[in-house]
Image (tube, rainbow, N blue to C red):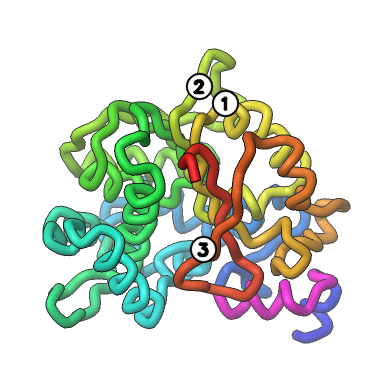
Amino acid sequence: MKYFFSQLFKDPAYVRYAIKKKFISPKSYSLESASSISDGNHYYLQAVIKATNNRKAFSNFKRDPAYNEILEHASHEEALASIEIIKNQTPELITNINDFRINDSVGGARCVEFDGLGMISPSTIRYMKVASDIISLFQNRIGENIVEIGTGYGGQYLILDRAINFSNYTLMDLNEVLELNVKYLESFVLNSYYKYSTLNQLGSEHNFDLVISNFAFSELPRDLQIKYVEKVLSKSKRGYLVMNSGNDNSVFTKGSPRWNDKPLHIKELEEMLPKFRQIEENPLTFPGNYVIVWGDDK
């Protein structure tokens, strides 16, 4: 097993992190077709397709072990830390907790009892924390058009739809994932409007007020990162990107043997993106993680 992983990933820190966070396993990761971690995990994509096309699987997809290798694995400890941050930044989100508990009503979420909050999943708390950050950073300047790179099942959008006033949301991911997004989101009545697109399908006329990515952009190979910069990030007035590559101590900075190159370094991103600043990921889910923010006038 150790030999397998030492050949698959040249950086031991990369391996330890990927196993710990259940992003990969020996049975699920493929080097032949991976364009990102989740793209290479065919067991994950099979779980996505099954949830999209099978009613019984959809009712419990958030508990599927193959799906959990990529999503729905936020820990209880991370959720506790996130709750304290939300209370300090945006206490109104805690007051309106029932507005966000709706995210756990579909898909068989694993809910936990939190003092004063009742039953709610750690993943929903994670999405609330991102919403809290965005409200705190951008105040009333968020704008009307938001785009998300790497959308999971649509949970972050659903939470933002309940927390923030905006008009349009664009979901960007693999085709299979986007199909699950539609099925999931159509289980609810939304306040805003959404559309979905792969990178190739996105029209050149698009401009965005805010781009969001929870690790997805930072886990792409270099060539795709460059295209996302050209087509999405450079056309976004504001940005909130949670990163685990780019800095010298970030776990994915060395990339993967499959990609034959490294993800964009922070110094390269400084040349390509609107002027941004780095802030700490809080709570820190792994050493070397950070958040890129621009357009917050700080």
Task: Identify the mark nearer the N-term, 2 or 1.
Answer: 2
**Disc with the residue nearer the chain's start (1 vs 3):** 3
Q: Is residue 121 left or right of residue 92?
A: right
Residue tagged 3 = 70
Q: Which residue is mark 2?
A: 207
Q: Which residues are magenta?
A: 9-21
Is the residue marked by circle 1 packed among few (<14), some (14-19), or many (20+) residues within 10 Å?
Answer: many
Furthest residue in direction front, as rendered: 298
- Mark 3 lies on a secondary structure that is loop
Q: Are marks 2 and 1 in contact (CB under 8 Å)?
A: yes
Q: What kind of residue is marked 2?
A: Asn
- The first of marks 2 and 3 along the sequence is 3
Numbered disc 2: secondary structure: loop
On the image, the x and y values in percent for residue 142 come to 36, 36
Compared to residue 184, the image places residue 19 above or below, namely below
Nearer the observer, disc 2 or disc 3? 2
